Structure formats: structure tokens, C-alpha cells
Image (tube, rainbow, N blue to C red):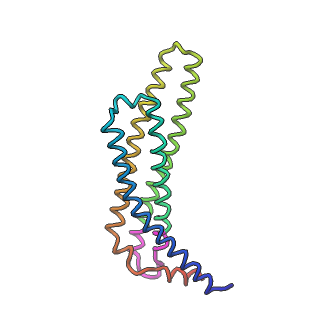
Amino acid sequence: MDIEKHKHIFAELHEHIKQKADKSLSDLVEHAHKIECFLHTTFVVNNEATNDRNPKQLNSLMQPVQNYLRDFIEIVEHLTLWLELQIPSYSDSEDFRIVVQNEILDDIASMKAQCIIYMGRFVEYREQRAQANKELFKQPTLDDNYHLISNLDHQFHRNLKLMLMELKSYIIRICNLLTKNKDLLERQSFHRQHINNYF
């Protein structure tokens, strides 16, 4: 086993992960700005009361929201890996730093899990709407089926807005957490210690 070679490879991987994390932070800020613009254009400038029951309008909103959720999940994955590598050894008497970093990781993991749940709601909505359309096809004269479809569209339209608002707040919270604890997180790089521990 070529230990020195593996140390060099690990050091390169660590640096690559750090660069990805640095880029992810700037991506998060841009992400929040795009979401804010999308919210303003879609739910403020346009007539929300008219559009929330328009199936074509609703379909045109779903893909961008899904993209924002997917991008957020990918971005925080890079940040999570970087933060995990920054956690020092318990033997270094860095208990406070370890606690802070673990709390940040827990917060980010919770946000990521909620976004995954949001992604599942798109599937649930499509399944419910497909079932309602099936019933409408069987009984086209029954007004209840029309009302059910209309209510499903109306509720999911409102959910899309709430998802985006929540996603924007997640981004702001992550940026706030990392900014407040910047000095603590950047206190002496531990990547060399990690390398020595692994090999």
C-alpha cells in the first residue's frame, strides 16, 4: 500500500470538496435571489386568484419549483460533506466546535429531508388528479368531480408558493448559520489531521 500516494490523493479530494463547498455557498445566495424573483413574478405581479385554478398555468409552475428543490438538495449535499470533513477529533479538546458543527449539520439535514418530502408531493398530486379525472370520465355530469379537480389544483398551487417560501427561508437560515460561525468553522484546517488519521 503506497501510503504517501494515498495521502496525496486524499488531499486533492479534500481540496476539491472544499472548492465545491465554496461554490455552493455562492450558488445558495443566487438560488435565493432567483426564488424571490420567481415568487414576485408568479404570485405577486400575475393575478394569483385567476391563475391558481388554471391547469396549464399550474403545470408551467411545477417544473421550475421541482428544479429549485433538486438544486437545493444537490447544493446542501456538497456543504454537508465539507462540514463533516471539518469536524475535528474528539481528542483535540474541541468539544464546543464539534457541538456547533453537529447542530448545523442536523439543521441542514432536516431542511434537506423536508425538500425530499416536498418532491414526493408532486407525485401525490398527480396521482390524486389522475384518479379524479378517471372518476370524471366515468361520471361527466357529476359536479362533485369537477369541484374536486378544481380544489386539488387550487390547493397544490398554494402549496407551490409555500414550498418556495420555505425553501428561501432554508437558504437564508443556512447562510446565516455559516456566516455566524465562520470563524469557528475556519479555525485551522484539519484536513492534514484527517489524512494522518486515515492512513
Residue at the location (34% across, 30% down)? 49
Q: Is residue 98 magenta?
A: yes
Against 33, is 16 above or below? below
Q: Quadrant of residue 100?
A: bottom left
Near-viewer residue (113 or 161): 161
Near-viewer residue (161 or 30): 30
Residue at the location (35% across, 44% down)? 39
Near-viewer residue (110 or 172): 172
- 4 to the left or right of 70: right
Quarter of the picture holding the N terminus: bottom right
Q: Residue 111, percent across and down?
A: 43, 54
Mainly helix, strand or loop, the magenta region?
Answer: helix
Residue at the location (66% across, 85% down)? 2
Q: Residue 170, percent across and down?
A: 38, 54
- 35 to the left or right of 123: left
Q: Which residues are magenta?
A: 82-101
